[in-house]
Image: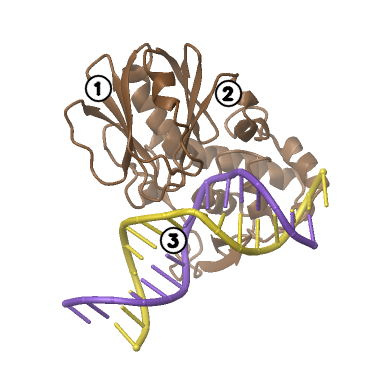
Chain colours: A brown, B yellow, C purple
Amino acid sequence: MPELPEVETLRRGLQTHVEGRLIRSVVIRERRLRWPVIPELEDILVGQRIHTLRRRAKYLIFECNRGSLLLHLGMSGSLHLLSQNDAPAKHEHLDIFLDNGYLLRYRDPRRFGCLLWTADPPEAHHLLATLGPEPLTDKFTAEYLQARAANRQGPVKPFLMDNRVVVGVGNIYANESLFLAGIHPARSIREINLHRYRLLVEATRATLSKAIAEGGTTLRDFADAEGRPGYFQQSLQVYGRAGQACLHCGHSIQIRVIGQRASYYCSHCQS
DNA sequence: AGTGCGGCCTGTCCGC
DNA sequence: TGCGGACAGGCCGCAC
């Protein structure tokens, strides 16, 4: 399941092969994604040059001459660079043929991802316009979190996973960050003081940075642009470890649904 | 305006 | 061993 570190890992892997390249042709085999792929997309893309490959939240943004291609990997999406004679397999919905001999192929079995075109600045697109700050920028601070918590209520974990609050923190990294910060996932956001929000900001940053450095988390079939798996799953402290001993204190890791998501925590280390 | 929940999908896993 | 059903999970968009 690609979260921010996975998308960033992918972006870094693709960047040098994609930027400056001309799109020679485009083949779309399945248009029924999270939103239907517009019928004009092939015609729009062919002949354009990809100037930059950026990331905003979990969206990859291919900035071209006349606009931007926005790509979200959803739950199960992946992108691979292949040679241009590679035959497509099941669930491989899109091919973008570049002028350097490479083929950029999008695969997404569950089709929760999307493929959008916008002629406007990407950040103005309605799906990106309401997104919160990037967690690895200086806009993500304890003061900011506390201010955002002031006019709402509820447990901290769904708060941390809310894209309007901060982007890129999915279920795995929310669990890990809260463990690292020593904050219980069900703790009310109003009960967390500035000091503990500082711990949470630092923990979130540290967790995401470490995951990026280790190439993302490979739970099922995540792989980077060249098909290599990530290694962060070896660093997971609580996620998926229900019933196992806490690596810090030895107490049993608990699992409980909070905000409709499986939440893993140590009731001894987190309060 | 903030909060909660249904729904979109398929691969995987569990129990019978 | 085979099969059905539950589950996972990002996140939008609607209902309250």
Q: Are marks 2 and 1 in contact (CB under 8 Å)?
A: no
Along the polypeptide, which appears first: circle 2 or circle 3? 2
Q: Residues within 10 Å of mark 1 (few under 14, many from 20)?
A: some
Along the polypeptide, which appears first: circle 3 or circle 1? 1
Percent position of residue A25, x then y: 31, 21
Please state which amino acid type lies under the numbered disc 3.
Gly
Label 2 sits on a secondary structure element that is helix
Q: Are marks 2 and 1 on the same chain?
A: yes
Q: Quadrant of residue A26?
A: top left
Number of numbered discs present? Answer: 3
Residue position for label 3: A240
Label 3 sits on a secondary structure element that is loop
Label placed on residue A92: none
Please state which amino acid type lies under the numbered disc 1.
Tyr
Q: Residues within 10 Å of mark 3 (few under 14, many from 20)?
A: some
Label 1 sits on a secondary structure element that is strand
* A239 to the left or right of A95: right
Along the polypeptide, which appears first: circle 2 or circle 1? 1
In this view, the mark in front (3 or 1): 1
Percent position of residue A152, x then y: 79, 50
Q: Are marks 2 and 3 on the same chain?
A: yes
Residue position for label 1: A102
Residue drawn 22% across and 18% down? A101
Please state which amino acid type lies under the numbered disc 2.
Pro
Question: How far is mark 2 from mark 3, CA to CA?
Answer: 35 Å
| B8, above or below C4, in the image | above
The chain carrying label 2 is: A
Residue drawn 40% across and 13% down? A48
Residue drawn 57% across and 31% down? A136
Percent position of residue A5, x then y: 45, 37
Query: Is residue A188 visible in this depiction of the protein?
Result: no
Residue position for label 2: A122
